[in-house]
């Protein structure tokens, strides 16, 4: 599976393509398949996201899990203060561990 990520231009937050727009929650990300490059070109041109790129991910019961450690860390937020971490979209569903 392939998912798209980048940073929101207004806030700088890490965001994930959810099929209709950008979400702060990796659990909302959808498979962009082979259309990822076109999606990113369109979103960059619309100036909704900065530095977008497509990554490999694994589907889990709780949503996509980025394949690379760098993107798993980006999905969970800063590593220096736990109070700045991004909580899962559905906290009751649990979450995967980095």
Image: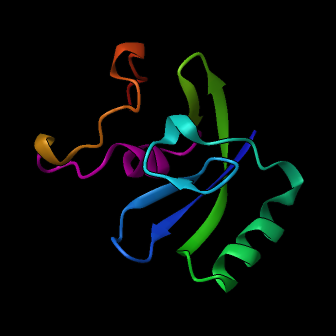
Total marks placed: 0
User: Is 26 one of the magenta-colored residues?
Assistant: no
Q: Residue at x 43, y 23 (%)?
A: 96
**Quadrant housing the N terminus:** top right
Residue closer to the observer: 70 or 86: 86
Q: Which residues are magenta?
A: 66-81
Q: Residue at x 30, y 42 (%)?
A: 86
State which quadrant residue 8 falls in: bottom left
For residue 54, above or below residue 75: below
Which percent across, then down, holds residue 38? 83, 70
For residue 48, above or below residue 73: below
Which percent across, then down, holds residue 43? 67, 74
Q: Residue at x 40, y 22 (%)?
A: 95
| Residue 19 as seen in the image, left or right of residue 98 | right
Q: Residue at x 35, y 14 (%)?
A: 92
State which quadrant residue 64 falls in: top right
């Amino acid at each position: 599976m392939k998912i798209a990520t980048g940073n929101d231009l207004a806030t700088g937050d890490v965001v994930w393509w959810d099929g209709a727009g950008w979400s702060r929650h990796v659990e909302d990300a959808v498979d962009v398949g082979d259309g990822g490059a076109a999606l990113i070109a369109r979103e960059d041109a619309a100036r909704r996201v900065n530095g977008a790129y497509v990554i490999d991910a694994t589907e889990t019961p709780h949503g996509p899990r980025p394949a690379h450690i760098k993107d798993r860390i980006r999905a969970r937020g800063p590593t220096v203060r736990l109070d700045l971490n991004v909580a899962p979209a559905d906290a009751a569903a649990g979450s995967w561990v980095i």
